[in-house]
Image (cartoon, helix red, strand yellow):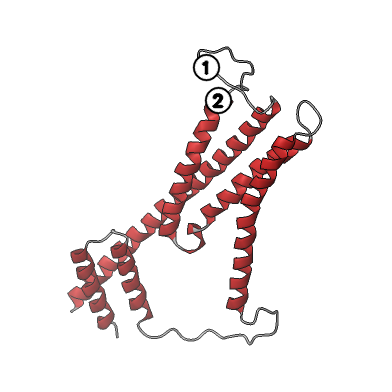
Amino acid sequence: MQASADEGRELSSSWGRSDHRRRLSDGALYLAGAAGLAASITVLFLGMRAVLGVGGFCAEGGPYEIEVHCPPGVAELMPLSIVGLFMFGGLMFWKGASLGGPYGLLPALAWPALFLSLGWNFLEFGVSPPGGGLAVGWLMPGVVFVLMGGGPLALAVSSWRQARSRRDGSGGGGWRPVQRPTQPPAGGDLSVRLARLERLRETGMLTRPEYEAARRATVATGEAKP
């Protein structure tokens, strides 16, 4: 029984270290995805401003004579930024699902960030275009883009406020009694270790036989405690 308990403690500690390393790796990739997504939106925003600054259209390459050349780097960077939106956004959704909590939903903020920033460009250059006057053709997509970005954001904020209100009780700021922390139930440490093993199995870090062996050893460890 003592040997089983020692084996269980060793296996549990090993799986705990493995889970910790996996979460560190997921967190690092998640941050890389966030940085790449922010950079992609920024490049697309600045590239669009550069194109609007030369009249709203430009071209590079091809067999025909080009009337308006694109600003340096725009023709190359803007397509890459669009690819980056999907690539880095997908990375954030993937690793956010592994991290759990709010991390899986944060990448959705890229939608309002993208459309609100591009809508601002249309509205700004629509009011004061390079040739002067008023560019109605730019104001209309500007309004549409702002609605596409601001509408979902407003709905998300409203849903979050309602969920927080329901979680807090009646939704008001009334007095609620303070709940004192209770003594954790016996076997809480064992249940935590079993839950960790279950999570490792669900994420594919453990095969079914490895999970069963680690579970038996962990249970034996818990039973061996006085």
Q: Quadrant of residue 125?
A: top right
Q: Tell me if residue 34 comes above or below residue 134 in the rendering.
A: below
Measured as percent of width and height from the top left, residue 36 is found at: 51, 41
In-image side of 131 versus 79 (left or right): right
For the residues carrying marks 2 and 1, which lies nearer the camera in this image?
Answer: 1
Measured as percent of width and height from the top left, residue 151 is found at: 64, 56
Measured as percent of width and height from the top left, residue 102 is found at: 51, 62
Q: Could you say whether the residue bearing mark 2 is in a helix, strand or loop?
A: helix
Q: Could you say whether the residue bearing mark 1 is in a helix, strand or loop?
A: loop
Residue 38 at least partly seen: yes
In-image side of 88 versus 54 (left or right): left
- The residue closer to the viewer here, 160 or 173, is 160
Measured as percent of width and height from the top left, residue 110 is found at: 56, 49
Q: Are marks 2 and 1 in contact (CB under 8 Å)?
A: yes
- The residue closer to the viewer here, 86 or 60, is 60
Q: Tell me if residue 115 comes above or below residue 103 in the rendering.
A: above
Residue 120 at least partly seen: no
Number of dots carrying numbers: 2
First in sequence, mark 2 or 1: give its number: 1
How far apart in space, not on screen, are marks 2 and 1 (Cα)?
A: 10 Å
Q: Residues within 10 Å of mark 1 (few under 14, many from 20)?
A: few
Q: Amino acid at mark 2?
A: Ala
**Residue at mark 2:** 75
**Residue at mark 1:** 61
Q: Residue at x 53, y 84 (%)?
A: 181
Which part of the image, by quadrant, shows the C terminus? bottom left
Q: Amino acid at mark 1?
A: Gly
Q: Residue at x 35, y 82 (%)?
A: 187
